[in-house]
Image (cartoon, rainbow, N blue to C red):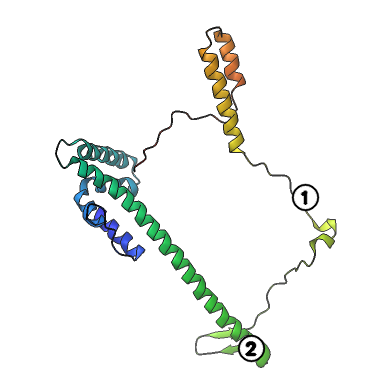
Amino acid sequence: MATKTVKQSEKVSNEQAIILQSGLSLEDLTREMAPFMDSVNQQIESEDPEIQEKSATLARESIGVMMLAKTTETPAVRDRLAEVYFAFLDLAGRIRKAVQQAESMARRQERFAEIIRSNIEAWMLTSWDAKKITGNYREFCITKNPDKVMVLDEAEIPEQYFDEVPATKVLNKTRLAEALKAYEVMREAAIKDQNVSPEEMDKIIEQTSIPGAILETNRTRLDIK
């Protein structure tokens, strides 16, 4: 399953296979780590929470085997696990680049088609006195577009043609985060202060709370280098 996914992605990227520092291709490495990669694929593809949880457990067990095995190959296996992570990031970048190139090509073809249409229209409007020309199964027809307002100078238009739009509130998360952090410092100081009574502590907590928002602390993330 994992190998198939990689092959499909490599076709989308339309570039040479990703070769890792270990000398293996991404396809070779995903085949070598088949149990782990299959469990990762299950986490992505399955919509069943039970299957996802089971797959996550299997993935963690596979990582444990690769990370903690007491063999001379263990450091190399750890490196390969990191390499497969970076390889998929690289592959994602290739695919995004291919999508951007495809979008640029699509816009060019649309522009090409529009120029063809505009030239036919210009010829019919200037050189042909009829509004319609037909082929065996295609039709060229000049039709009237809906009327369109052209604003020459918005400042000169009378106020009666304007609608009042109420101001839109936008949450400033930076200011909110700064306030929550400041309140957290105040709480920690109060907790350390032995002279603060439980009643006073309750009051401090109430005064340093912002309805609808909390500050998540002790958050961690894994960095692979």
Amino acid type of the residue tagged 1 in the rendering: Glu
Q: Position of residue 36 (x, y in %)?
A: 24, 45
The reply, left or right, for residue 32 in relation to residue 161 is: left
> Which residue is painted at 21% across and 44% down in the image?
77
- Residue wearing tag 2: 124
Q: Position of residue 194 (x, y in %)?
A: 52, 8
Q: Who is closer to the viewer here, 93 or 61?
A: 93
Q: Who is closer to the viewer here, 130 or 122?
A: 122
Quadrant where the image shows the N terminus? bottom left
Amino acid type of the residue tagged 2 in the rendering: Met
Q: Position of residue 183 (x, y in %)?
A: 58, 24
From the viewer's perspective, is residue 150 above or below residue 199?
below
Q: Position of residue 31 (x, y in %)?
A: 21, 53
- SS class, disc 1: loop
- Crowding at label 1, few (<14), some or many (≥20) Cα neighbours within 10 Å? few
- SS class, disc 2: helix
From the viewer's perspective, is residue 138 above or below residue 109?
below
In three-dimensional space, the C-alpha distance between marks 1 and 2, rounded to whole angstroms, equals 44 Å
> Which residue is painted at 35% across and 46% down in the image?
47
Image quarter for residue 132?
A: bottom right
The reply, left or right, for residue 46 in relation to residue 66 is: right
- Residue wearing tag 1: 164
